[in-house]
Amino acid sequence: MALITKRVYGSEDVLPKDSYKWQFLEKLMREEAGSFGFKEIRTPVFEHTELFQRGVGDTTDIVQKEMYTFNTKGGTSITLRPEGTAGAARALLEHAIYNDGLPVKAYYFVSCYRYEKKQANRYREFHQFGLEAYGTESPAADAEMICAAQSIFDRLYIGDRLSLELNSIGCPECRAEYYKALKEYFSQHKGDLCDTCLSRLERNPMRILDCKSPVCSEIAKNAPMVLDYICDDCREHFEGVKRLLDASGVKYTVNPKIVRGLDYYTRTVFEFVANGIGAQGTVCGGGRYDGLIEELGGQRMPALGFALGMERLIALLDSSDVQLPIPDTCELYIASMGDKAQEKAFELLKRIRSCGVYAETDIVGRSLRAQMKYADKIGAQFSVVLGDNEIERSRAEIKNMQTGEKREIRLDNGFAEDFLQVKIESGNKSAEYFK
Ligand code: HAM
């Protein structure tokens, strides 16, 4: 196939017949985020490369292997965002949003770019919905963050298709001990580690734990686990998170192997993992990142968040028996014959659409027969045919396309009123989801 009619490898189109799923989910997520007090933040699709090097971490797979980085004509190195957290943190600092009061709570929808090997549910362009909160160290914030994610899954009736896996990876202090243990362990396998992991051994041995190479991940299986090394403060914090999750009835399993693939995490980390959608089952991941804001040049400010992969969520919904509400079909089709009738159709459509009705007419120049065929095809619920006769009488017949029942309708100021009356009497209750 010619290149210009082929999408870029690893990217996807959302087609008109499927976009209702995205719209429905976005609406639900906005509502849910709003009910927890989060407000939307929109940041650019690209940032200075250094932001991700410093934020996500230059020993991560993302920074070392997966970023879409290029120089602008002016010679500045910029990168398409591989995730949403660093950009939101940059905006927090740039606009000093923390002065508006703490905690700052923000949500976002972002497209992300990672040059990864394509697999089922792993793309090079994908979309995330995320929440971030800044300025709170309390375990209550961690628990609330997790409750917000859980609550989205529950509203979609897929809470039981996901398992929440929880861990604490400690603070920089307790991590020093852990690094020592990891170095010792991985040094015994030096001969088998990939080149990237060999360099990680000195700088950041924890990154070896999420290397995608099969040999390294096999070796990583028996590595020491961070939960055995965390300090008393971190343990107490972790217990606090678990206590509030228990109180909220959120089920979780402690999985000491979860370390996450980004460098900024401290203390709580978590993932919601789905079964039944293949190897890439992590639908949502997040955690605390108490050091990131300082790392980016701000004052020390604890923070935390999560991001949920939209494509993976939709794959999970598609594989379950949850049917998202299908959007309305056309409520009224006005067919017309002749110029006068067409003008009248345009006038009536303006009125009826201003009442929130989904209505269509012919914009192709089809015969009456073909217009009615089209009305049928799009599943129009009612139709009106306008010709000279109808214009003269200022009356027409409105037909219920399902039952075949016909009624008279006024074509003057009473048109919208008559139509809404017909609609109510027919008991049609669709459209409610999108209002
Ligand atoms: P992440 O685990 O890299 O975390 O990504 C979050 C979610 O994005 C994943 O659980 C997955 O659903 C989706 N995702 C990641 N990569 C791909 C891909 N190649 N194709 C399809 N979906 C993908 C972060 O991005 C952090 N910024 C999350 C966070 C926010 N932590 C704190 N705040």
Image (cartoon, helix red, strand yellow):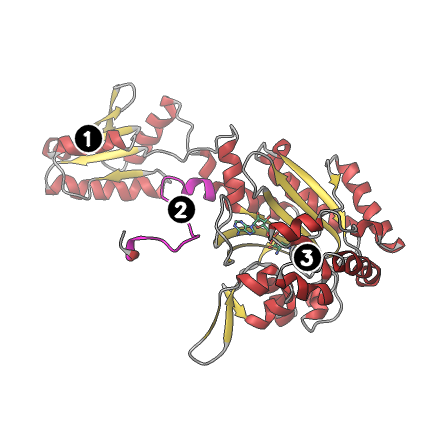
Q: Ligand 1: does it lie within 8 Å of the C-beta at label 3? A: no
Q: In the rendered view, does 285 fall on the left or right side of 332? A: right
Magenta-colored span: 4-23
Looking at marks 1 and 2 on the same chain, the residue that comes earlier in the sequence is marked by 2
Nearest to the observer: residue 33 or residue 11? 11
Can you tell which mark lies on residue 372?
1
Asked which secondary structure carries label 3, the reply is helix
The residue positioned 58% from the left and 65% from the top of the image is: 64
The residue positioned 81% from the left and 48% from the top of the image is: 238
Looking at marks 3 and 1 on the same chain, the residue that comes earlier in the sequence is marked by 3
Q: In the rendered view, does 228 fall on the left or right side of 379? A: right
Give yes or no for residue 16 being in the magenta stretch: yes
Can you tell which mark lies on residue 400?
none
| Amino acid, disc 3 | Ile
Residue depth check, mark 3 versus mark 2: number of the one nearer the observer: 3
Q: Position of residue 12 (x, y in %)?
A: 41, 49
Looking at marks 3 and 2 on the same chain, the residue that comes earlier in the sequence is marked by 2
For disc 3, the marked residue is 208
Instruction: Answer few, some or many: residues within 10 Å of disc 3's Cα (few below 14, many 20 plus, some between 14 and 19).
Output: many
Q: In the rendered view, does 16 fall on the left or right side of 307? A: left
Can you tell which mark lies on residue 14?
2
Q: Position of residue 237 (x, y in %)?
A: 83, 51
Work out whether residue 27 can be spotted. Answer: no
- Splitting the image into 4 quarters, where does residue 165 fall? top right
